Amino acid sequence: MHIEVGYRVLAEALFIASGWFWAPISQTSQALVCHTPQLELCLAQLPSTVKRQLPSNRAQLRLQMGGRGAMARPVSHSSIAGVVFLSVENIPMSSSALWGGEVYALPLAASQQLTLIHELGHLATARLPVDYWGQEGLTPYQHEWLADFYLVWHLAKQGEPMALAWQQYHKRNLAVFESVQAMSHWTTPMLSQLLARYTWQQLGQFERFSALIAEVYPHLHQYKADELNEFSSLLQQLFGASKLHDLPQYMFWRRPAMAQYIRPTLERMMGQQAATAWLVEQAMNSPVHGE
């Protein structure tokens, strides 16, 4: 089975009809995609050696899902990378945030399919050679941005519009504008570097995800936990519901980078003129870098 633009056909036809299907991860591995209402039927497609690596209590799997729309579980197998569990009714079709006294909403095109590809990205990341990041392994934050890198690479390789990659970028920003609890998934600082380094055509020319990561990984600025915590504090001051006053000097050393990362989303939601005015008010004006 080849990865094609037909992911949407797969999700809407095979998935709806059977409750499960196999999705390719690479030339040598694939993942089983399960619709949670047909969990037992789906997991029956796995060999026993793989099934034993998953919780035997299927109710526990549903509990781990919580209210999430998707969850990936890697497994150890020569050709099966893992299982993706989808609860499509819990996948949002829009993203929104409140700032400046106004609610801004972004409709999410192909939301279910992009969610699926992101989860496949987690499984692809788990199969990357460990020599990229050493024996200490990946942090949860690195796992998230690498999964989004997979999503962007996949979209480019399949000739999908770049607007879908920017949609993921805006979605990540809007989530932290709404609540800093979403910082664990704030992949924007890394996506910004990827989209600045390569054109859409260049991204699509990487035959394998591993080839992209091998080339780009050494050149990325990797934010440490304390740096991300500072960004989180700045976001809380800028967008938090409890904000009382503008503090233009607060975290002034983080403001230039923050402005670069959020400007494309502000312009997408507010328009360029209003976005620039808002950034000036926050002592965060920066050069334009976006769609």
Image (tube, helix red, strand yellow):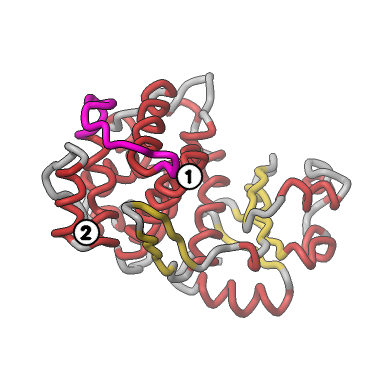
187 lies above or below 39: above
Q: Residue at x 30, y 63 (%)?
A: 162
Residue mark closest to the camera, 2 vs 1: 1
Residue 235 horizontal side relative to residue 120, left or right: left
Q: Residues within 10 Å of mark 1 (few under 14, many from 20)?
A: some
Write down the residue under mark 1.
179
Main SS of the magenta part reads loop
Q: Secondary structure at mark 2?
A: loop
- Residue type at numbered disc 1: Ser
At horizontal 35% and vertical 60% (from top left) the residue drawn is: 102
How far across and down, in percent of the image, does residue 165 sit?
Answer: 35, 58
* Dot 2 amino acid type: Glu
Q: Earlier in the sequence, mark 2 or mark 1?
A: 1
Q: CA distance from mark 2 to mark 1?
A: 24 Å
Residue 77 as seen in the image, left or right of residue 187: right
Quadrant housing the N terminus: bottom right
* Point 42% across, 28% down: residue: 132
Task: Report which residue position mark 2 lands on.
Answer: 291
Where are the magenta residues, as a range? 240-256
**Image coordinates for residue 30, horizontal then vertical, percent:** 60, 55
